[in-house]
Amino acid sequence: MRVYSFEKLIVWQESRKLTKEVYLLSKKFPKEEQFGLTSQVRRAIVSVCSNIAEGSSRSTSKDKARFTEMSFGSLLEVLNQLILAADLEFIKIEELNKLRPRIDEIAMMLNGLKKSQLNS
């Protein structure tokens, strides 16, 4: 079985784990949010690792960095949506606070990846 370059990236591996956690957490959202916040946070979290993967296929450093930027934007979108979910009492603040260090870590890794892409 072939292993693609993005699969070796720790930032992709960690964002994949976070995706699973966000999906499980969003199961707690009210049913009436299925097409609202639940759908939005799930699409955004999938975009984090998907953009890392797609960017790895690009030929120029600038293109790779652009997809890494989109990943970062999606990650912040997820954070915003989880904050809103806590405000709306769909999740407990403790659940949000448990994920924040993971989000911060992935954000730092994405910044590092972008810098390395632009410097190559």
Image: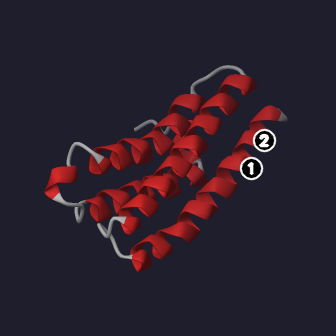
> Which numbered marker is on residue 112?
1
Where is residue 29? Give x, y as percent: 24, 61
- Quarter of the image with the N terminus is top left
Three-letter code for the amino acid on which mark 2 is drawn: Ser
> Which numbered marker is on residue 116?
2
Residue 17 placement, left or right of 33: right
Q: Nearer the viewer, residue 63 or 96?
A: 96
| Residue drawn at the location 46% of the way across and 52% of the way down | 78
Judged from this view, the residue extending furthest toward the top is: 59
In the image, residue 67 above or below residue 48: above
Q: CA distance from mark 1 to mark 2?
A: 6 Å
Where is residue 93? Give x, y as percent: 42, 76
Judged from this view, the residue extending furthest toward the front is: 88
| Residue drawn at the location 29% of the way across and 59% of the way down | 26
Three-letter code for the amino acid on which mark 1 is drawn: Gly
Q: Quadrant of residue 118?
A: top right
